[in-house]
Image: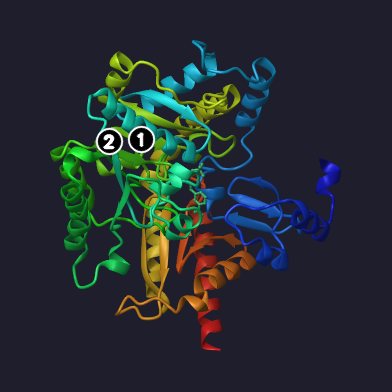
Amino acid sequence: MDGFRALATEELQTLDNNHHLHPFTDSKVLHDIGTRIVTHAEGIYVWDSDGNRIIDGMAGLWCVNVGYGREELADTAVRQLRQLPYYNTFFMTSHPPVIDLSEQLAKVTPASFNHIFLTNSGSEANDTVIRMVRQYWSIRGKPEKSVIISRHNAYHGSTVGAASLGGMHDMHVQGGLPIPDIRHIQQPYWYQEGGDLNPDEFGLKAAQALEQEILEVGESKIAAFIAEPIQGAGGVIVPPDSYWPEISRICEQYEILLVVDEVICGFGRTGKWFATDYYDLKPDLMVMAKGLSSGYLPIACVAVSDSVAEVLIEIGGEFAHGFTYSGHPVSCAVAAENIRILQREKIIENVDQSTGPYFQQQLRNLESHPLVGEVRGIGLIAGIEIVEDKQARRRFDSELKVGIRCRDFAARRGLIMRAVRDSMVLSPPLIITKSQIDDLVDIARDSLDDILHDLNN
Ligand code: PXG
């Protein structure tokens, strides 16, 4: 492995081009540009194969919540690999790490959540949701309740089921998605879709789109509504304050299950354990991944509320669903230790009371920049919306690829920031300090200046 790392960047890039197909990537473009090879990481920083140190403003892919280089997690993994590297949880068997993790999750989730179904990715967890909610209604004697309502521009994963739940047009056109009985309503994206309404008026309207859809399809056919509390991959879209209370009212009134996808928002991102706590939601199912193990090993889950669990357990019989690696012992051991680190070091409290507000306040100062239409976010998740016309809330022509260019300027200056259209999104490790936040925001500001300069020349 060390020998491999010693290869020069160009050699690594050539080998990568020759043999590795990347996810969500135009391979031809990648082959022309060459990929960045990341070799190691510590805290909030990653290093590339040219020796550059870069602030990881995205915590990997929204996941490395406790930061890189955690010896405790490495030690836990090695210990578990030696003791029991694999055993399944099918066929009436279990093992200590899965038991421990399930109990830990029952403790940190809201009181009504006491049962956990484990998977290996957020996508698998969302596929599990599709099967579980349909099974739930079927057990309750209402198999016709099979329609799941989601939202345009939602991201719920990349498997056939999860991509169907998602509202990403580009994913749907590749492969004839969505699968039947998945419907999509308007997203609560005031900045781009709010028109002349104020945010709260628009938030109500976007929520009432759910009610309209229920009435149009027929209440008797609707199984569930699924949503991210804050859309992540869609561009860090924070709904107006009026949105979630109205959604909650509608779900209760029409007796449809509320599924909250906490894959990005969970495990402290908003300064609470879950955005469900932040928004005071009462979901029936919660989906988690990413921060569950801080990305150190693949693991995800669906947390099941007592009222749903009771139906599944007491009268459901066998749920014919699961994966070879459901409750993998090494992933479970690492995830449980990750939760203990979050608790021991009071990382989430610190985001809530100190670094989260500071991050938001420092980023809000960028709103005076000529290109910045809006900065939005909560805790340590944020989006910076680059616009051509602030008054009209109008974006640049997409051909100009302003977001991608800004991202590239930032990378050259030592910050990984992601571009979703022209929204620059940030979600740094939760252990970031105030002075590191200053460095991050300085580079973000300089990168905005770079793109402004570029556009004016
Ligand atoms: N739900 C949400 C809210 C997500 O953000 C998934 C489910 C799927 O998780 P898995 O583990 O199957 O990837 C995600 C994943 C991006 C990006 O470009 C975001 C994700 C995945 C890949 C790319 O921001 N989020």
Mark 2 and mark 1: span between their CA atoms?
7 Å
- The residue tagged 2 is 283
> Is residue 298 found left or right of 134 in the rendered image?
right
Quarter of the image with the C terminus is bottom right
- At label 1, counting other C-alpha atoms closer than 10 Å, the crowd grade (few under 14, some 14-19, many 20 or more) is many
Seen in the picture, residue 349 relative to 318 is either above or below; the reply is below
- The residue tagged 1 is 286
Q: Residue at x 18, y 68 (%)?
A: 197
Secondary structure of the residue carrying numbered label 2: loop
Residue 127 in the image, given as x and y percentages of width and height: 43, 37
Give 263 or 372, whichever is nearer the viewer: 263
Q: Residue at x 51, y 79 (%)?
A: 400
Seen in the picture, residue 448 relative to 114 is either above or below; the reply is below
Quarter of the image with the N terminus is top right
Q: In the rendered image, which quarter is residue 382 located in?
A: bottom left
**Farthest residue, direction bottom:** 457
Residue 204 in the image, given as x and y percentages of width and height: 17, 56
Residue 98 in the image, given as x and y percentages of width and height: 50, 20
**Farthest residue, direction top:** 92
Residue 302 in the image, given as x and y percentages of width and height: 40, 31
Secondary structure of the residue carrying numbered label 1: strand
Seen in the picture, residue 13 relative to 370 is either above or below; the reply is above
Q: Name the colouring of the figure.
A: rainbow
Disc 1 under 8 Å from ligand 1? The reply is no
Q: Do the numbered discs 2 and 1 sit on residues whose CB atoms are within 8 Å?
A: yes
